[in-house]
Image (cartoon, grey):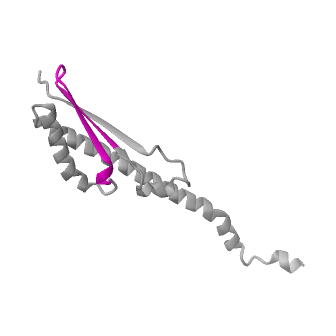
Amino acid sequence: MRHYFEDKRGASAVEFALVAPVLMFILAAIVGYGMVFLTAISLQQLGADVTRATIGGFSVSEKRELAAEHLAVARREYVLINNDQVVVDVVYDTDTETTVVEIAYDTTGHPVELFRGLIPMPANTFTVRQSISERTT
């Protein structure tokens, strides 16, 4: 019996079995939140690009058209953004001469959904709001 308690073979395997789930959870959290942050930052940049593109329009309809054209071209550059799930709204305030672009993105079907049951994740819809003023002083 004494030989059984002194035997150290397999101790590393037992230690690894205890530590591995924690390490896997940390790795999944890093990858999952990295994808969330990449998507959020990509949407911020996309919103800024689309908002700058609207500056050339004279009316709300022209601004919406410019935003749609730029969105069709620019969103191909963002890997984690599905083109079909981006919704853009353009509003122009004539009093302040400010264009406000709001982009909503639904993450349904997004790769980040793989981590939803494993780690706490944000809501399914990301919303970005950008504005640009045309007033010169």
Q: Position of residue 132 (x, y in %)?
A: 20, 31
Whether 94 is among the magenta residues is: yes
Q: Depth check: 131 or 33 in front?
A: 131
Q: What residue lies at 85% left-to-right and 80% top-to-bottom?
A: 3
Q: Where is residue 131 in the image (x, y as percent from the top left)?
A: 24, 32
Residue 3 versus residue 77 in the image, above or below = below
Quadrant containing the C terminus is top left
Whether 68 is among the magenta residues is: no
Residue 28 appears left or right of 91:
right
Residue 99 sits in which quadrant?
A: top left
Q: Depth check: 34 or 46 in front?
A: 46
Quadrant containing the N terminus is bottom right
Q: What residue lies at 42% left-to-right and 52% top-to-bottom?
A: 108
Main SS class of the magenta portion in the image: strand
Residue 57 sits in which quadrant?
A: top left
Farthest right residue in view: 1
Q: Position of residue 74 (x, y in %)?
A: 21, 51
Q: What residue lies at 28% left-to-right and 53% top-to-bottom?
A: 83
Residue 63 appears left or right of 9:
left
Magenta region, residue range: 82-104
Number of marks drawn: 0
Q: What residue lies at 51% left-to-right and 53% top-to-bottom?
A: 116
Q: Depth check: 42 or 93 in front?
A: 93
Q: Where is residue 91 in the image (x, y as percent from the top left)?
A: 23, 31
